[in-house]
Image: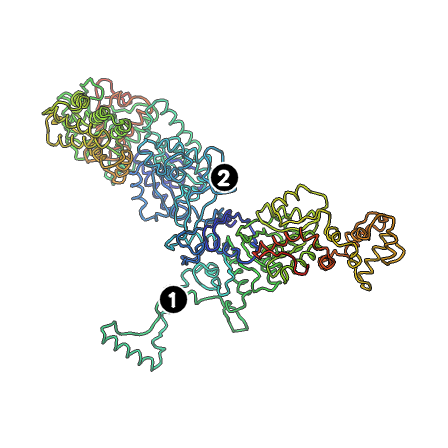
Amino acid sequence: MTSTILKLTISNFRGVQDLEWYPSASMNFILGGGDTGKTTVLEAIDLLFSPSTSFSVSETDYWMRDTTNSFTIEGVVRLGDDVDINAQPNMVYPWHWDGNRAVIPDTNEDNEGNDEVYRFRFAANEQQETLWEIVQPDESTVRFSVGLRRQIGLVSLPSDERNDKDLRLVFGSALDRHIGDPSLRSRIGTQVASIDLQGELSEEAKVALTALDAKFAEKALPSGVSIGLTSSKGISIGSFVGLLAQKEPNTPLPISSWGAGTRRLASLEIGAANATAPSFVTVDEIERGLEPYRLRQLLTGLSRQGGQKFVTTHSPIALAASPEAQLWYMDSSGRLGALPSDFVKKQQKNDPETFLARVAVIAEGITEVGFLNHLLTLALDCPPQDYGIRVCNGQGNDHTEKLLTALDQAGLKFAGLADNEGVRAGSWAALKEKLGDLLLQWEEGCTEEAVISAIPDHQISSLIGEEGEDKTSVRLQHLKVRSGAEERTLASICAALEGTGKSMKQLVIEAASGNKDGAPEDDKKAWQKHASSWFKSEAGGAELAQKVIALGGWDDLSERLLPLINSILNSVELKPIENIPDAR
Amino acid sequence: MPDKSVFDLLRSDEPLVVIEAPAGCGKTYQGAEFAHDIAPTLGKGRVLILTHTNAACDVFAQRTRGISSNAVEIRTIDALICQIASTYHKVLDLPPDPTVWAYTQNGFAELATRVSAFLQKNPIVPTALARRYPIIVCDEHQDASPEHHQIVMAIHEQGAKLRVFGDRMQSIYESNAKAAVNHRERWEALVASAAHDELDFPHRWANDAGGCSELGDWVLKARQTLLAKEKIDLTTGLPAAVKVIIAANTTQARGGYHVNWLQRKPLDDHLNGHDELFVLASSNDLVRSMRSFWNRRIPIWEGHTRGALHELLSDIQSIDGDAVRAGEALTKFMSTIAKGFSASTHGDTLKAEIKCGCAKPRRGSPGNIQSLAKMLLADPTHVGISNAISVIAQFIEDSAAGFADVKVDYKREFWEAQKLAQYEDASRGYAEITMRRSVLRPKPFLKTLSTVHKAKGLECSNTMIMECDRNSFGDTIYGRCKLYVALSRAKSSLAIIFPETNPSPLFKLP
């Protein structure tokens, strides 16, 4: 068993003013648009369990660069079996985890099942001094030693290209931990120091040095000068020693000069190969430098490895390859909410990009995706994804409702567009109450019905399509079948409708929405499939949007659609529009 | 050979080992050697040695010198309790520094009760302690209260191995007969639940340790006799080192002591015949009487506790600005620690002066007492009282009128009471003085008077056990234990002093 962070609290650290987070015990994916603070969360974990002896704080580490407020990172941790927390110089006493926070065990109740946890804290004060502390149950603190931090174990793969620390022999690196030879550095130092550098000097250099020596003696400075190895603060000999590998036979090359992806895979592999597996692995932008197949390989490796993993990603491949991961979404206000896995899983599989956008609109079906994308493209004069807006397929009315409700319960705001199937009215009403203009549910049924109804009757023939087009004849065929007309022409269909009380528009709505009422038993399935030849596709949805504007139906709809569009724009800080540009 | 079997048993895998350890049989040696051997095998774990006194901590610290302090921790069980209580003070309804609280409230027992209950309910805490201390050595465990024992057992139940040393015959803190019986039964139950062995070689009296081995054998045999509820036979087979002296106490007053001149000579001779001698008596009153008896030549060993000072402190807490009560507290304190200062000699006058507000000018003895009254009227707090005690000290030194006959028996306590004025808060001051004392570790004079209780844990070359009458050493568990503690102090010689009438029933007399 390795250690687990049960709760992470960040206050005033970089872009995160206040964050309380209960991560999952194994794989955590933090999703969300750019600049929301995902990386900061990872860096906070890196810092709290840093294997380095020190960390130099800069003013940019403080919230709003305000160094008058100290910043703290605190973790409530259930420790792994082999962490010698109680063998520290000072006795470290346990807290009890009540499922929500570390509390002092209560004397009034039986705590047979009390849950032993410890509180670790990193703090930087107004003087930019740093402290690693363990908080005792009386709020006094003892040192959280670097030895203990290393025992808990952290492997960190930051997205910073230059950082290949774990491939070098620096203190606390994965390589250092793996080799486990603490005196190696000093032995290397001794050997290097014994190299006769003086003897390597050229004749000219020796003359120059002799001249310098004479000058020194003249000025009563220390004399008898020579050159040799001197130590330097901050740079250890170990940082010049790193892992090499055979590029070609007999050509060892430092792994740090291989590609970014290889370097990261290698770092992680070293971390995983250690006798004591690291408790925590943080990987920022896991897809960086990796082709899809190696990304999948890395994720499979990671999920097999024990410990608690913290991963940020923008890669749909990564999400698709990690079905077991707990997904977290950091919204633009810096809230980190759990994406409830039951509902999110299906969505994640069908459209992994749902949770990679800055704002996602859950549209109930493919028609709605095409329809809304077309409108947003018109509104923005570019594809909506350029602004981090993602219109996603909610896979049906029921799933869309559950997904939106679950997201809302996680404290996250998503937008939605849905039909009214006359079911779960209470839930939809509750959602509308919470989401306001971010949710549009048609009153009159499905999108096709609402939109086609808005088109003037005399334009219906244009909606069906231009004569001679393939889809036009397919659509006419549907109408012929449905009306019982003799010929596949508008005139014949009109004639067939006469006296039935059904208008052409109604017939088109029925065909477009795959209505199977009145179909012969054997044809029910075929009738249902009619919808896909009309607007039930992404292109169809776009066609519907384009035609409702072109055919003069927009004015009726804009009252309902503009508030949705504008609240979507607002959530990515874009200005509202007065109307769709083409509509006038 | 038990030393060897004890050695092996300590190092066995037995989770709970109890070693019955009569005085002077090398338990500290065994315990310390065990710590030496076992500590390096524990990895990051440590040996915890729990004692009952700071003096015992010192002894173990000397004997375990050379082991890293990361491998062996030596502390009193109260210190461990205070650490736990301090860490969890919020739920234990205690101030952040329970040590001060315990010192001033006499609250160590209460602290142990709360911590014991806390550990029972929260196994994670003893679990953490058991991880830190996989081995716990308990010294003088017969002195552990039931709560102390529960605390140790709570850690034991989470996996710490216990190595318990104790001697049921040195249990002298339960004078109540019923309580003493209960205590003995608890000990027997503990022994029954454990792997058990007994040390039986009197190392303290070995010739090469400067002792008298016949005396050692005799003391160990006496222990068996007392334990078996039989009488120690003083009629035959006495080693040369044991001397019996008959001396009748002619004072009727309880706790008083006087011997007529005929019987006195052997006592004086014995006293003068040794440079190093503990004169032991069973009660504080008797010890003070001995001091008078030998014309105040022999100092009293005050030990590590200060009964009168503690009483003064609790009296101070109820003064509430009332100078009369302050005067009463002062009188009570002085009469407990000094001869010649009582209500009738000083206290009544002091009270009268306070009551009349020192209205009339006085001179001589009443004048001196009046100056004390003025101090208490001006400042009826611990500061006023403490300063008044300092003035009394000056009066005594100057043989001032009315104070020439005041003789201080408990000099340390008298001195410490004068220090109280330095502290703003009386409780904190008392706690501070007490803590300093435990750091300074006072040691007795070579020749000293002491109660049996205060001599417990000490050893000396020669002892003289005064007034072995029925009052001092009755036929109870308590009386037998107290007698055994008294008998087992001396390494070289022992004198037992009897009255002819009403002698202790624990002896068969010549």
**Circle 2 is placed at which residue position?**
A114
**Circle 1 is placed at which residue position?**
A189
Q: Pick whichever, B243 or B292, lies toward us.
A: B292
Task: Tell me the quarter of the picture where residue B161 sits.
Answer: top left
Please tell me whether mark 1 sits on a helix, a strand or a loop: helix
The spot of residue A175 in percent (x, y) is 48, 61
Within 10 Å of disc 2 (Cα), the crowding (few <14, some 14-19, many 20+) is: some
The numbered disc on residue B320 is: none
Chain letter, disc 2 residue:
A
Residue drawn where x is 56% and y is 51% of the image: A26
Q: Is residue B151 left or right of residue A110?
A: left
**Mark 2 is on which residue type?**
Asn
The CA distance from mark 2 to mark 1 is: 50 Å
- Dot 2 or dot 1, earlier in sequence: 2
Count the labels in the image. Answer: 2
Q: Is residue A150 above or below residue B162?
A: below
Residue drawn where x is 78% and y is 52% of the image: A509
Q: Locate the C terminus of chain B and report the quarter of the image it occupies.
A: top left
**Mark 1 is on which residue type?**
Gly
Chain letter, disc 1 residue:
A
Q: Pick whichever, B24 or A561, lies toward us.
A: A561
User: Is any atom of residue B285 visible in this view?
Assistant: no
Residue drawn where x is 54% and y is 73% of the image: A249
The spot of residue B1 in percent (x, y) is 36, 38
Task: Tell me the quarter of the picture where residue B108 sits.
Answer: top left
Instruction: Report the residue that reaches farthest toward the front.
Output: A584
User: Is any atom of residue B429 visible in this view?
Assistant: yes
Within 10 Å of disc 1 (Cα), the crowding (few <14, some 14-19, many 20+) is: some
Viewer-side label of 2, 1: 2
Please tell me whether mark 2 sits on a helix, a strand or a loop: loop
